[in-house]
Image (spheres, rainbow, N blue to C red):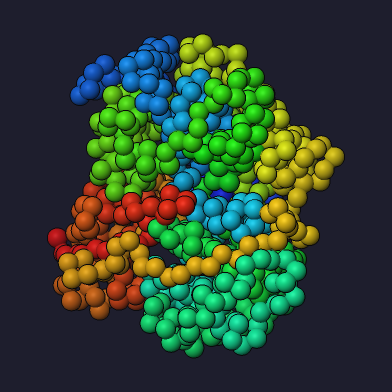
């Protein structure tokens, strides 16, 4: 029986905008209402409006499940039996083959408290380096590029409210009209003030259609386009020499490299007419204020870091960074994609955005955790590398997974499903029996957003409080309770508080002095101030909505130009696989669809996966609207339904990634990794198609 604590101010469970909402008690169960919060100003998308229906969903997991042997069915068991089984599996694997054979896989939707505790659990209770999370598949390329160029990674270095003050915005690889509709209020206001928007996207999405200029580039040619824009900016005297001299280093080499990206060559590389490239460069260069914003389209490539660096070079050369209403920013994706990567869930990081390989950083965290620094493991494998070696000699043999569904969301997912099945032991904590949970030996039912207290950090770097609005169903535990209970059984109970407030107090101390410093942030401040922006080093500090106004976060305070050359995607179309396959989202679904496919309104709006094909291309293959289409790549085969549209390029097809089984586009995607961020190339591969 659901017991609601009246109307509670909280935030949407889904994307990084973290729209403010109320959860309201009602005769017919819980509902949500929009809340006037700085990110959404009272707006919600359809996902937010329908989020409460999942709290009482009939498919909700409410008891632990366990299978006695591989091949047996999952059966309900008591919590003690499930937790004991997990601990037995951990001990068996570690005693037999060493500590590194146990791994943890987390999620970008987990609260900061859970992400922090999960990272600590891996390093202190399991002493394994093998922990990473699905956020690696999301913003890791932008994060790596921002650290290289600016010395710090925060999605947006300014609040959303600054967007209307930008005369020009260059938006690369984002369909915000569909992915986070309430944010369009800021873009609409920008255009009401006579601002303009240039969108770079292989598809004429609704966002691109709303823009002043759309550059419909060839998939994978992003860096060439960025270099071409900078070439024109230099040629036409649009760059800001004073800014470059005073606040940056490395421009000379970048200028040398982009000299070979003249417009006609870039037109050949990108498919974008030279005249459009020139127009875009002038819109940016002639504006007094401008922003360059990237998202997954350009980041989820094997050259994702270089792509982002090339666009950062452009912003720096134009003097459009570190000034009001200017800057480079990344529109993060997952609800806590930002905070999830700041507090130790990533293979190479410790809380506060510290590096696990740095002796001083290790010493600080070990002091807070009251352990010997030498006992902390070193860096582990990145997400795909970890999944790729599951069950193999030298790989992880027992895996615990929280808030993630890699059996749908990982690249080359057929292989990843095989690796998951090859594990000696898999435990999954989730709300529903996801595709990954179906493969598990033990499944733990966990709480949803409205049932647990905790903080999230949105795309602006604003730390938010999700208040507990209702009790979970009987038998459902929070993630922090689960971690603390497992730690207790492993003999480390004294290190692991289960209450989110206690965890956050420890997180504050652990992050103190780090790049992502939360030490001045309290639950009370967050609630009273509409969130607090990090870094916030003490309780009298106001927080930092705007970074870089005086200096960048590098040793000398200067931003770094990094020269980038265009290089082709890991897999380009050829005779056998003649088209580009690109992937993305639709408005009514979220990530692997574990939640949104179970919401009737959202399911009914888009019930199945589809492939967008240009009508002229479809005609060549005898494909009509709604025909079943078999898509094949070197990784596998998927069956989806045709949706004919002139908004897609003739050489490209698009499939959204929210579905499992045979409609899962990740059966097709290429796990080629960016060498720096280890981001898989979700966004570009070569495909062939035929009517089924
Ligand atoms: S835009 Fe994102 S945070 Fe806002 S309601 Fe939609 S899914 Fe939720």
- Point out the image quarter for the C terminus: bottom left
Q: Quadrant of residue 558?
A: bottom right
- Viewer-proximal residue among 15 and 12: 15
Residue at 54% across, 53% down: 144
Rendered view: 46 above or below 245? above
Residue 351 screen position, x and y as percent: 61, 35
- Viewer-proximal residue among 80 and 151: 151
- Viewer-proximal residue among 60 and 423: 423
Residue at 42% across, 83% down: 265
Residue 1 screen position, x and y as percent: 51, 23
Rendered view: 361 above or below 300? above
Farthest right residue in view: 540
Residue 501 screen position, x and y as percent: 67, 26
Residue 536 screen position, x and y as percent: 76, 42
Q: In the rendered view, does 468 fall on the left or right side of 209?
A: right
Q: In the rendered view, does 288 fall on the left or right side of 392?
A: right
Residue at 34% across, 54% down: 672
Q: In the rendered view, does 216 fall on the left or right side of 323?
A: left
Query: Does residue 597 appear in this view?
Result: no
Q: How many marks?
A: 0
Query: Does residue 281 appear in this view?
Result: yes
- Viewer-proximal residue among 162 and 534: 534
Residue at 37% across, 38% down: 386
Q: Quadrant of residue 32?
A: top right
């Amino acid at each position: 029986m659901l017991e609601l604590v009246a109307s509670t101010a909280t935030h949407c469970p889904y994307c990084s905008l973290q729209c403010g909402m109320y959860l309201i008690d009602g005769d017919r169960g819980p509902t949500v209402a929009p809340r006037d919060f700085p990110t959404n100003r009272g707006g919600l998308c359809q996902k937010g409006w329908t989020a409460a229906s999942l709290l009482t969903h009939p498919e909700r997991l409410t008891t632990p499940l366990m299978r006695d042997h591989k091949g047996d069915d999952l059966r309900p068991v008591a919590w003690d039996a499930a937790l004991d089984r997990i601990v037995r599996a951990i001990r068996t694997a570690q005693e037999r083959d060493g500590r590194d054979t146990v791994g943890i896989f987390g999620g970008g939707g987990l609260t900061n408290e859970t992400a922090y505790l999960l990272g600590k659990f891996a390093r202190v209770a399991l002493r394994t380096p093998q922990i990473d999370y699905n956020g690696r598949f999301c913003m890791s390329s932008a994060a790596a590029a921002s650290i290289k160029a600016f010395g710090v990674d925060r999605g947006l270095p300014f609040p959303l409210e600054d967007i209307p003050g930008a005369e020009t915005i260059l938006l690369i690889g984002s369909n915000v009209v569909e992915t986070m509709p309430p944010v369009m209020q800021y873009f609409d206001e920008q255009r009401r003030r006579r601002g303009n928007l240039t969108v770079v996207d292989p598809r004429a999405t609704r966002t691109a259609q709303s823009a002043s200029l759309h550059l419909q580039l060839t998939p994978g040619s992003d860096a060439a386009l960025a270099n071409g824009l900078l070439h024109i900016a230099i040629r036409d005297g649009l760059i800001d020499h004073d800014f470059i001299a005073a606040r940056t280093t490395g421009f000379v080499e970048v200028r040398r490299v982009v000299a070979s990206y003249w417009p006609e060559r870039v037109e050949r590389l990108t498919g974008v007419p030279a005249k459009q490239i020139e127009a875009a460069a002038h819109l940016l260069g002639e504006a007094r204020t401008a922003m360059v914003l990237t998202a997954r389209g350009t980041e989820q490539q094997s050259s994702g870091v270089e792509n982002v660096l090339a666009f950062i070079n452009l912003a720096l050369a134009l003097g459009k960074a570190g000034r009001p209403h200017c800057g480079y920013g990344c529109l993060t994706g997952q609800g806590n994609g930002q905070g999830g990567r700041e507090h130790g869930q990533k293979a190479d990081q410790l809380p506060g955005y510290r590096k696990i390989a740095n002796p001083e950083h290790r010493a600080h965290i070990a002091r807070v955790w009251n352990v010997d620094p030498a006992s902390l493991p070193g860096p582990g494998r990145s997400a795909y590398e970890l999944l790729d070696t599951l069950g193999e000699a030298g790989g992880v043999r027992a895996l615990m997974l929280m808030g993630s569904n890699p059996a749908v969301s990982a690249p080359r997912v057929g292989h990843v499903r095989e690796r998951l099945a090859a594990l000696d032991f898999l435990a999954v904590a989730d709300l529903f029996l996801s595709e990954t949970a179906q493969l598990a030996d033990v499944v733990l039912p966990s709480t949803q957003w409205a049932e647990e207290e905790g903080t999230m950090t949105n795309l602006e770097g604003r730390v938010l409080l999700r208040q507990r609005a209702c009790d979970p169903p009987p038998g459902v535990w929070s993630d922090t309770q689960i971690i603390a209970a497992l730690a207790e059984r492993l003999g480390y109970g004294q290190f692991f508080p289960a209450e989110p407030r206690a965890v956050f107090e420890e997180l504050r101390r652990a992050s103190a002095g780090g790049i992502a410093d939360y030490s001045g942030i309290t639950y009370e401040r967050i609630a009273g101030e509409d969130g607090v922006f990090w870094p916030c080093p003490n309780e009298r500090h106001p927080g930092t909505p705007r970074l870089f106004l005086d200096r960048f976060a590098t040793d000398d305070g200067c931003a770094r130009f990094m020269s980038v050359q265009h290089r082709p995607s890991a897999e380009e179309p050829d005779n056998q696989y003649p088209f580009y396959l690109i992937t993305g989202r639709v408005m009514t679904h979220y990530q692997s669809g574990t939640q949104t496919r179970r919401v009737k309104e959202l399911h009914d709006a888009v019930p199945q996966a589809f492939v967008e094909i240009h009508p002229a291309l479809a005609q060549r293959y005898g494909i009509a609207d709604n025909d079943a289409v078999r898509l094949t790549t070197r990784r596998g085969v998927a069956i989806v339904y045709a949706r004919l549209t002139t908004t897609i390029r003739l050489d490209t097809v698009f499939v959204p990634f929210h579905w499992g089984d045979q409609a899962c586009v990740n059966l097709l995607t290429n796990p080629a990794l960016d060498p720096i961020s280890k981001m898989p190339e979700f966004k570009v591969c070569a495909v062939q198609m035929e009517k089924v």
